């Protein structure tokens, strides 16, 4: 096959982060408090984003003279039943994995292969919906993606807000829909959703409300909103111009017109080893491929381990061959992706070699039948051990124990020239890939996984040091490539090995579908469908394809908070998410004003996950964490900070203030702190809480003079994920955090008082993300039922100590992750990856066409209006609203700002 011509440039990276914060007043930043001032004042939020066209070569793929989808096929991949966990690469570092625990195969939604190698395809009461708030409230690019692969080097260098005001342009209540003002948006609004799911009846809410609730299941088509003007086949609508009027009760519907579907965006995944994506990023990966989104996965290492491709019983008698084992794992990955994309594990690939800006070469594979699916192999040497010292590794390279890390080329790769990379060259190489593919969503592993009590890493060292290289490359890409020449991008991080000790997040069908793909990767049938002497998959995983329970779950390491959308006293809306490593702000002025944004606040290195809170004087504050690298490897740190509006309603923000971190040094717990949970109690006292690396609760409280107290230890044990906080009807602050078996809670005895001790709630185990909101005199929690995806809720009251009332199962559309809750509206990720929503008692869950990053967020504004927002895989904000009454529906989704397509 012809290889790509030499390229004039190379995938290029840049320098580490240079963002400094000022220490918060009070001088108690903690052991690693920041004393620097952040460069640049977050004034009127930075330049507004502009839309950009797709890169040449369609579907956002790298452009140039590289392989084309119809080029001579390379190694075709195969289907197999996976059986091993990630530890099979490193010998006995990991405990034995669990076997296949899932039933019933899920039907495939992928198209049949369009081009193959000719091989056959494998073949309870009280949900609080009516309770009063208390306390505080595709168009896919056209053209072959693979045509760009050869030019890979050609590029130039918790909301505590009083729920007041009207938020979104009103949604229909009964037969009425609200008219929406147009926001200079070229694309139209997207249908709020029709779908099928599980309905559940709710009883009314007051404190301690109860009553029998039956649940109804069934798939239905739910009424759309604004059907007056035209419906197109994909169910997409656009709201016509018009302004929302005062009272929600007498608003009328505006006609709707046909519009474009939501932009699918472009997804790029960066993982350390072949199979990390299958174990830790699925089902998100499968959802994106099934939806036809452009997807590229970058593998940093060859995953050669000890070079023995054999099941446990045959490893002693099998000679090691690292190039062949690396090739077998590649073959298994190609088979798994082909099966996800076409249904045929043997669907053909075009394999090509391209130079990189790091001075080496990479293999780029393009799936011929689905050229929007690409694989990029950097083929660096892996550590070969989970925990133990391995200088010749990504870890050793990052820490400066070696000056360069060499390649381990697979036996079948078109890359023939040996090379090695310095630390900076790895960063340049990955940044160059980003320049070529111009993703709008980047998926990466967890760069701060923590340590177990015995001080061992809770994840493979390749996983989190690979994620740190990804962080550095993303920072360089954002810095070196002007916003006019690339789209905005959002980042999603995923937990790794620690998933095995947490409750299962997936329902049986989703878990089975995930396991099926690992089965393909593991080459269970041993048929040589790929035509390779190295083998067609990874036999190390064949004994335990489910890994350590990894195929039954998935968890985001960051960005699970649901309090990033909030309202102000003028009924305007504010949304805060991280794009390009900076906090992006979107704003709608008043109840019917036009949306603006995204505008990026100065300061880089921000991690996914922002919490917004309304202060007693009406100003809004946004809290998050920032990662900085420093001059030495040991200077890597993650700290908490916040920024506050200069005045209520203004778009200008003050300087970022650092609250430091409770972690003494990166070496202690790998800087493993959660995103902050923030709330204002009834005495007007602001506080921020994080889970620290020791899995306990820490917090800082702002004092009456505006300074901050020190990081305080609040105890607890085995905490996971991000804590949540809200205030009850008496203004008392409550904080909750999930453990592997239940939920712990803390509560103030009265407003202004310190938190009480950690208290068991008695709740059953939950999947990690929690959502909390003050209502019905207490604080209501929402979470998911393990192994089901169903949404559950319980009211927690604080009189006489924490007490849980009325645990209720609300059903759902399966799925996983956080659930946003405001008024009568619930929303969260459903099976298939789209947004699912529930609008109240007796109503079926609805499914929207939107696929999104992180968690949704919602808030109540005005006279009984609920606003809901997500950031799509195109890194674009989408908003909708609903009247807060029994007959309401969600209005069509409104995209904010121009299309985020890049150039």
Image (spheres, grey):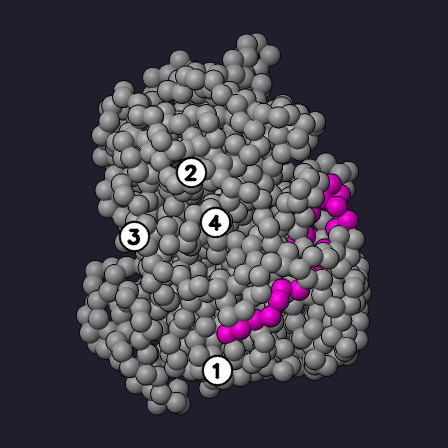
**Which residue lies under the disc numbered 4?**
478
- Residue 304, horizontal then vertical, whole percent: 53, 22
Disc 2/disc 1 C-alpha distance (Å): 43 Å
Q: Which of 789 and 136 is in front in this view?
A: 136
**Which residue lies under the disc numbered 3?**
53
Q: Which residue range is magenta in the image?
A: 651-674
Residue visible at 48% across and 49% down? 478
- Residue 74, horizontal then vertical, whole percent: 31, 23
Say which mark, if any, is on residue 571: 1
Residue visible at 36% across and 65% down? 897
Disc 4/disc 1 C-alpha distance (Å): 34 Å
> Does residue 432 lie above or below 391 as drawn?
below
**In front of the other: label 1 or label 3?**
3
- Which quadrant of the rendered structure holds the N terminus? top left
Specify whether residue 703 is painted magenta.
Answer: no
**In front of the other: label 2 or label 1?**
2
- Residue 643, horizontal then vertical, whole percent: 61, 67
């Amino acid at each position: 096959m012809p290889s790509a011509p030499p390229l004039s440039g190379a995938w290029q990276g840049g320098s580490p982060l240079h963002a400094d914060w000022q220490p918060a007043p009070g001088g108690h930043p903690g052991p690693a408090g920041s004393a620097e001032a952040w460069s640049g004042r977050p004034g009127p939020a930075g330049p507004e984003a502009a839309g950009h066209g797709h890169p040449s070569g369609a579907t956002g793929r790298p452009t140039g003279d590289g392989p084309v989808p119809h080029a001579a096929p390379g190694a075709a991949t195969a289907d197999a039943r996976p059986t091993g966990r990630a530890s099979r690469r490193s010998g006995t570092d990991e405990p034995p994995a669990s076997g296949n625990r899932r039933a019933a195969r899920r039907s495939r939604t992928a198209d049949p292969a369009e081009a193959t190698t000719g091989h056959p395809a494998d073949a309870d009461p009280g949900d609080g919906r009516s309770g009063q708030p208390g306390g505080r409230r595709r168009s896919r690019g056209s053209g072959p993606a693979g045509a760009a692969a050869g030019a890979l080097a050609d590029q130039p260098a918790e909301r505590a807000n009083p729920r007041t005001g009207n938020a979104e342009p009103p949604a229909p209540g009964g037969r009425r829909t609200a008219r929406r003002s147009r926001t200079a948006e070229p694309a139209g609004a997207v249908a709020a959703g029709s779908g099928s799911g599980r309905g559940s009846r709710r009883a009314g809410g007051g404190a301690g409300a109860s009553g029998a609730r039956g649940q109804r299941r069934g798939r239905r088509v739910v009424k759309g909103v604004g059907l007056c003007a035209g419906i197109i086949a994909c169910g997409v609508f656009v709201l016509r111009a018009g302004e929302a009027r005062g009272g929600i009760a007498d608003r009328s519907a505006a006609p709707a017109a046909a519009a474009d579907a939501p932009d699918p965006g472009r997804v790029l995944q960066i993982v350390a080893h072949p199979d990390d994506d299958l174990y830790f990023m699925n089902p998100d990966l499968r959802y994106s491929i099934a939806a036809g989104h452009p997807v590229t996965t970058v593998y940093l290492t060859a995953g050669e381990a000890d070079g023995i491709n054999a099941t446990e019983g045959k490893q002693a008698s099998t000679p090691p061959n690292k190039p062949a084992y690396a090739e077998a794992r590649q073959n298994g990955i190609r088979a798994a992706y082909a099966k996800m994309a076409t249904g045929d594990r043997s669907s053909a690939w075009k394999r090509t070699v391209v130079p990189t800006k790091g001075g080496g070469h990479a293999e780029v594979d393009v799936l011929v039948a689905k050229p929007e699916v690409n694989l990029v192999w950097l083929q660096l040497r892996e550590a070969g051990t989970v925990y133990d010292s391995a200088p010749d590794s990504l870890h050793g390279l990052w820490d400066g124990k070696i000056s360069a890390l060499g390649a381990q080329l697979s036996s079948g790769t078109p890359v023939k020239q040996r090379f090695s990379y310095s630390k900076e060259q790895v960063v340049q190489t990955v940044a160059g890939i980003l320049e070529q593919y111009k993703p709008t969503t980047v998926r990466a592993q967890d760069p701060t996984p923590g340590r177990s009590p015995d001080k061992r890493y809770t994840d493979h060292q390749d996983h989190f040091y690979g994620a740190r290289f990804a962080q550095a490359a993303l920072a360089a890409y954002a810095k070196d490539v002007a916003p006019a020449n690339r789209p905005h991008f959002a980042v999603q991080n995923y937990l790794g090995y620690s998933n095995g000790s947490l409750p299962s997040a997936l329902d049986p069908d989703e878990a089975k579908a995930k396991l099926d793909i690992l089965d393909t990767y593991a080459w269970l049938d041993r048929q040589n469908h790929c035509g390779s002497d190295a083998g067609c998959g990874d036999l190390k995983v064949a004994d335990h394809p489910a890994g350590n329970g990894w195929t039954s779950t998935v968890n985001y390491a960051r960005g699970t908070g649901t309090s990033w959308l909030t309202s102000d006293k003028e009924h305007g809306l504010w949304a805060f998410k991280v794009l390009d490593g900076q906090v992006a702000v979107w704003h709608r002025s008043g109840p019917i004003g036009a949306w603006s944004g995204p505008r990026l606040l100065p300061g880089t290195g921000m991690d996914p996950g922002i919490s917004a809170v309304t202060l007693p004087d009406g100003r809004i504050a946004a809290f998050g964490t920032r990662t900085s690298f420093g001059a030495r490897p040991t200077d890597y740190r993650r700290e908490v900070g916040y920024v506050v509006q200069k005045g209520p309603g203004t778009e200008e923000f003050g300087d970022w203030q650092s609250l430091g971190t409770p972690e003494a040094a990166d070496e202690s717990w790998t800087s493993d702190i959660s995103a902050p949970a923030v709330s204002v109690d009834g005495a007007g006292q602001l506080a921020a809480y994080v889970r620290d690396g020791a899995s306990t609760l820490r917090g800082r409280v702002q004092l009456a003079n505006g300074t901050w107290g020190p990081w305080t230890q609040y105890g607890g044990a085995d905490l996971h994920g991000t804590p949540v906080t809200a205030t009850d009807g008496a203004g008392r602050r409550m904080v909750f955090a999930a453990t592997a078996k239940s939920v712990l809670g803390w509560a103030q005895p009265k407003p202004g008082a310190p938190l009480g001790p950690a208290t068991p709630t008695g709740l059953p185990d939950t999947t990690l993300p929690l959502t909390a909101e003050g209502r019905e005199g207490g604080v209501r929690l929402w979470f998911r039922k393990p192994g089901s995806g169903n949404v559950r809720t319980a009211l927690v009251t604080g009189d006489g100590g924490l007490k849980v009332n009325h645990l209720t199962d609300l059903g759902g559309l399966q799925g996983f992750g956080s659930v946003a809750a405001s008024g009568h509206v619930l929303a969260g990720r459903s099976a298939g990856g789209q947004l699912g929503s529930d609008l109240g008692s007796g109503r079926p869950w609805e499914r929207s066409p939107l696929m999104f990053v992180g968690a949704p967020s919602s808030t109540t504004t005005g006279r009984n209006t609920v606003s809901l927002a997500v950031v799509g895989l195109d890194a674009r904000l989408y908003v909708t609203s609903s009247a807060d009454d029994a007959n309401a529906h969600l209005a069509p989704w409104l995209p904010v700002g121009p299309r985020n397509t890049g150039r």
